[in-house]
Image (tube, rainbow, N blue to C red):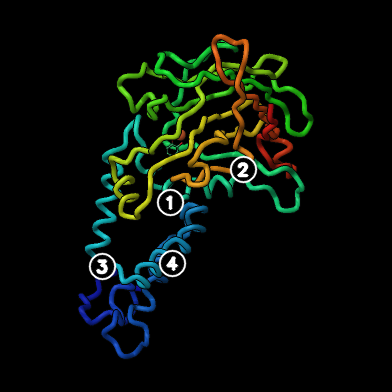
C-alpha cells in the first residue's frame, strides 16, 4: 500500500460505521437501531495487541455495559457533564487524610462486593465462610507500635474503655502465630477518626501490636460508636439525592498480617447497634457481629471483648483452603 502522504486527500464520505463516528445515529433508515450499531464494537476494537492483559480482558465488558447504560437511559451531555464534575470534585477533595473516591464506591457497595469476591469461599471447599470486611477510607499507614497490654487511647474523650484480647492462630493447624501484626483503628466517641478531628492527637485510637510466641494479644481500646460517614462532599450529596442516611454501625477496623499468611482486612460490629441492618456502606456480615461483655475487676476497662483471629497460610490458600478469621465468642 502506498504511504498515506503520497495519496491525494480523500474527502469522500467515510463508509458508514467505519470509525464508529459516522453512522446511523438515528438518521439512517438502513438500520432499525436508533444509534450507530457499530459504535461500541469500534471502541472495543481500538484496544491494541500489546494492551495490558487484564485491561484487555476487562474493557470490552466495561465499555459495553457503560454504552448500553447510556443508550438505555438516554443520558444527555448535560447529565454526563455532571458525572465528570462529580468525579473531579471527589479528586479535589481527596488527600492523605480524605479518600472521597473510595467513599463513593463504598456507598455503592462496590468495595464490599469486591471484598466478597476476593475472599469468597470456593463453593465446594466446605471451609468456614471468610469473615473479611472492607478497608474503608480511614486506614493510615505507620500507626504507632505498642507493647501488648497497652492502650490506643491517647486522650480522654469519654467512651467505654474495652479490654480486647484473644489469639492469632493458623486456620488449618490451629497453631499460634508468632509476630503477627494486629493493626487496629476506630473512631472517637464523637464519631470522628483522628485525621478528621483537629481536637484529637495524631494517631489517636490507632495502634499496631505484635504477637509473642503464644500468639495471644491484648490491648485497651474503646467500645465503638455509630457514626455518619463524611457527608460534606460529593459522596454525601449523592446520599442526599438518593434519600439515604450516612450512618455506619459502630465498628473497629483490623488488618491482621503475618509472614507466610494471607493478610486479613476486617471489621467487627457491636451486636447492640441499631444500624447493624442498615449500614451505609454495606459491610456488615453476621459472623463479624460481636458481644461486648461487662468487665469486673479491671479499673481501666468497663467492657471485655474476646476475639480470635485465624489466618490462612499462603501455601494452604494456594491449595484451595479459603477463609480468613473466625469469631470465637467469650
Ligand atoms: C468508614 O469509617 C468506613 O469504615 C468505611 C468502610 C467507609 C466509610 C467510612
Ligand atoms: Fe470505619
- Crowd rating for badge 1 (residues with CA inside 10 Å; few <14, some 14–19, many 20+): some
Q: Nearer the viewer, mark 2 or mark 4?
A: 2
Query: Which label was assigned to residue 76?
Result: 3
CA gap, disc 1 and disc 4? 20 Å
**Of marks 3 and 2, the one in the foreground:** 2
Tell me which numbered mark, 1 or 4, is placed earlier along the sequence: 4
Q: Nearer the viewer, mark 1 or mark 3?
A: 1
User: In the shown orientation, is residue 46 left or right of residue 297?
Assistant: left
Q: Which residue is mark 4?
A: 64
* Mark 1 or mark 2, whichever is nearer to me: 2
Mark 2 / mark 4, whichever is N-terminal = 4
Residue at (61, 33) in percent of width and height: 290
Evaluate whether residue 15 shows in this view: no
- Front residue (pair 191, 28): 191
User: Mark 1 falls on what kind of element?
Assistant: loop
Quarter of the picture holding the C terminus: top right
Mark 1 vs mark 3, CA separation in Å: 22 Å
Q: For mark 2, what is the residue?
A: 286
| Residue in the picture at 62% in, 44% down | 119
Q: Please report whichever mark, 1 or 3, sits nearer to the chain's N-terminal start.
A: 3
Q: Earlier in the sequence, mark 4 or mark 3?
A: 4
User: Foreground mark, 4 or 3?
Assistant: 3
Amino acid at each position: 500500500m502506498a504511504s498515506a502522504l503520497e495519496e491525494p486527500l480523500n474527502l469522500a464520505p467515510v463508509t458508514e460505521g467505519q470509525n464508529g463516528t459516522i453512522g446511523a445515529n438515528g438518521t439512517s433508515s438502513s438500520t432499525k437501531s436508533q444509534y450507530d450499531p457499530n459504535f461500541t464494537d469500534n471502541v472495543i476494537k481500538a484496544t491494541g495487541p500489546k494492551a495490558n492483559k487484564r485491561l484487555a480482558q476487562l474493557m470490552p465488558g466495561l465499555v459495553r455495559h457503560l454504552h448500553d447504560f447510556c443508550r438505555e437511559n438516554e443520558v444527555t451531555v448535560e447529565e454526563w457533564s455532571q458525572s465528570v464534575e462529580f468525579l473531579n470534585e471527589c479528586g479535589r477533595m481527596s488527600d492523605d487524610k480524605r479518600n472521597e473516591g473510595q467513599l463513593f464506591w463504598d456507598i455503592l457497595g462496590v468495595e464490599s462486593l469486591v471484598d466478597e469476591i476476593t475472599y469468597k469461599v470456593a463453593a465446594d471447599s466446605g471451609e468456614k465462610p471468610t469473615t473479611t470486611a472492607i478497608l474503608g477510607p480511614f486506614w493510615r499507614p505507620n500507626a504507632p507500635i505498642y507493647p501488648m497490654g497497652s492502650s490506643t487511647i491517647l486522650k480522654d474523650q469519654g467512651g467505654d474503655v474495652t479490654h480486647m484480647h484473644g489469639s492469632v492462630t493458623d486456620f488449618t493447624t490451629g497453631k499460634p502465630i508468632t509476630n503477627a501484626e494486629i493493626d487496629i483503628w476506630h473512631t472517637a466517641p464523637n464519631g470522628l477518626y483522628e485525621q478528621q478531628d483537629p481536637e484529637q492527637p495524631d494517631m489517636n485510637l490507632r495502634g499496631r501490636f505484635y504477637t509473642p510466641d503464644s500468639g495471644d494479644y491484648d490491648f485497651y481500646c474503646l467500645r465503638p460508636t455509630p457514626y455518619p460517614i463524611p457527608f460534606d462532599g460529593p459522596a454525601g450529596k449523592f446520599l442526599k439525592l438518593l434519600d439515604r442516611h450516612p450512618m455506619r454501625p459502630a465498628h473497629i477496623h483490623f488488618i491482621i498480617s503475618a509472614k507466610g499468611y494471607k493478610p486479613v482486612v476486617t471489621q467487627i460490629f457491636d451486636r447492640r447497634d441499631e444500624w447493624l441492618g442498615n449500614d451505609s456502606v454495606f459491610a456488615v456480615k453476621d459472623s463479624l457481629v460481636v458481644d461486648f461483655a461487662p468487665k469486673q475487676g479491671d479499673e481501666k476497662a468497663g467492657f471485655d471483648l474476646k476475639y480470635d483471629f485465624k489466618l490462612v497460610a499462603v501455601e494452604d490458600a494456594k491449595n484451595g483452603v479459603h477463609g480468613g478469621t473466625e469469631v470465637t465468642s467469650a
